Amino acid sequence: MIRFRMHRYNEVSILLELEDLTVETSHSCILIVEAHCKDTFKNILTNRIPAYCSLLLTVAKSGGIPDLEKEIVKLLISMKDIPEREPGEEKLIPICYDEQLGNDLNKMSGYLQIEKETIINHHVLMDYRVYMLGFLPGFPYLGFIPEVIAMPRKKEPVATKAGAVGIAGQQTGIYPVDSPGGWQIVGYTPMCMFDVTRKNPALLLPGQRVRFEAINLETYFKLK
Amino acid sequence: MFMKIQRAGLLDSFQDAGRIGLAELGVGQGGWMDSLSAALANILAGNDREEAVLEMHFPAAQLSFQAPVSIALSGADFDAAIDGVALPLNRRINLPAGSEIVFRKKINGQRCYLAIEGGWDLPPVLNSVSTLLKSGLGGWQGRALKKHDKVPLKFKNTLLIEQVKVSPFFVAPYMWYRAAPFHVFPGPEWDWLSAETQKQIMETAYTITPSNDRMGYRLAGAPLEMVCNKEMKSSGVLPGTLQRLPNGQPLVLTADAQTTGGYPRVLQIAAVDLSRLAQLGTGDSLWFSFIEMDKAVQLMESQQQWLQQTEVGMRFQISGYS
């Protein structure tokens, strides 16, 4: 049985946290619970925040919370096999690692004692999943990069450009707008990560699979 | 029909109740910091409570109206005046064409709300006209108001208003400046604090540092000692979440906070107290007191009831007043 904790977060919110499972399994399970609650409680749910191993749910009126909790417990108890990977569609994100755009590869190479090309290869070859969107509207947290290229955040945030692809710990993420940021920048995507004029404003959604595709400077400017 | 900005303020932005149901995309609810004052301003202006208002910080903008308008101010007292005559808070005020409002000094509070009858004509972005500064979305061109901006109004006032007229009726605010502890619940990582810190945080005051804005307030006080140094996986957060920063000091999240965070969430300020928090600023002290969930829910319901009664009462008053 799945071990979990249900925490009453405030008057109108609850937090579900899963324990003991791998982060992949937890996340699959969280997305199943999220989708179920979205359908079953669409009239009372106001916000859903799925993350790695947790789901924060907010309702319009506190009176709805007992039913919501009961339904989640029922669902978790009935769950036996959780798919290791959401069979979601794979998104290809073009990325330009060219240093003319300005990135932190030189610094990273010195810190990690690894060739820049090796960092790029590790980053571009992984198969990622979107664990959550947070920090800024449309900012995806992708996991996971190999430990050999994991980097701590910068000590102080610096001005970071929209489209910048960064590394923090074993996560990689993409800045949707110009913003102060502390992630180590490896490259830039020409894609618009968040656009309110689109039907789906966020380019990536939790659970989606993502691969990067290396492009040169010329292609970057053509796509931008 | 326009409102014109004669001089820019520190941070004046349009806000409504914010964006609901987009948190999974990293879009927090945002919206007005002090929902009670915003609602009062709207009620007095004769609007729906959901109408967007102008949220002003001090120094606030200097505003002018080319045509007659009915307005109301609520929340912080910035000593508003027209031609040297003070304008009171929490009353309906009719202004003649050409009126220019100045805000002379900060008397109390941090955020003053201006509602205008009929509201401003602003295009909704993701179902809200709230300004989300960090993404440059919503409100007036996704930003704070600047000098020379001319923001169109939706409603054309047909009243003939020849001089400033303040309504005899008013609403008494809901005691949000009263010094009282902030009601809190234990956060998901409350147990990560040492027993001594758990005691201390409930017994000592924390001061709001100059680093406070629509995203969060950094506090200063007795450092928070941890007994658990587990690495935390990022997880959902809400306005009112009190996180422990790596330097041991607390950060309280406010309306425009991000939707997820990786710092331990040690306390959660009750939603019912967030309007009061919005009126505190640099140098103000706050302290905490646990509240039972049922009690907090009751307080929230009575706050809503008070607002509804005020709304009904004001509708009646306004209908007999011009």
Image (cartoon, coloured by chain):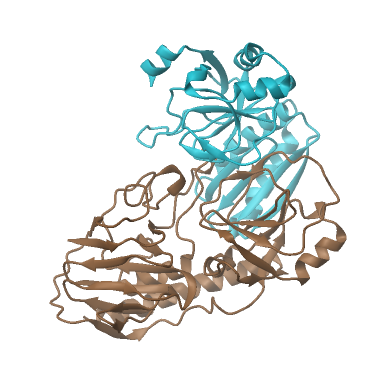
Chain colours: A cyan, B brown
Q: Image point 38% across, 50% down: which residue? A: B128
Total numbered labels placed on residues in the image: 0
Quadrant position of residue B240: bottom right
| Residue B290 x/y as whole percent | 73, 68
- Residue placed at 82% from the left, 44% from the top? B229
Q: Nearer the viewer, residue A89 or B282?
A: B282
Across and down, in percent, residue B96 comes to: 18, 76
Along the horizontal axis of the image, is A112 left or right of A58? right
Is B137 or A67 nearer to us in this picture? B137
Asked if residue B136 can be seen in this view, the reply is: yes
Could you say where residue A75 lies in the image, as x and y percent from the top left?
69, 38
Which image quarter holds the N terminus of chain B? bottom left
Q: Position of residue A64 (x, y in %)?
A: 59, 55
Residue A32 falls in image quadrant: top right
Q: Is residue B277 above or below residue A35?
A: below
Is A63 located above or below residue B158 in the figure? above
**Outermost residue, bottom direction?**
B168
Residue A84 in sight in this render: no
Quadrant containing the C terminus of chain B is bottom left
Q: Nearer the viewer, residue A55 or B194?
A: B194
Q: Residue at x 59, y 25 (%)?
A: A104
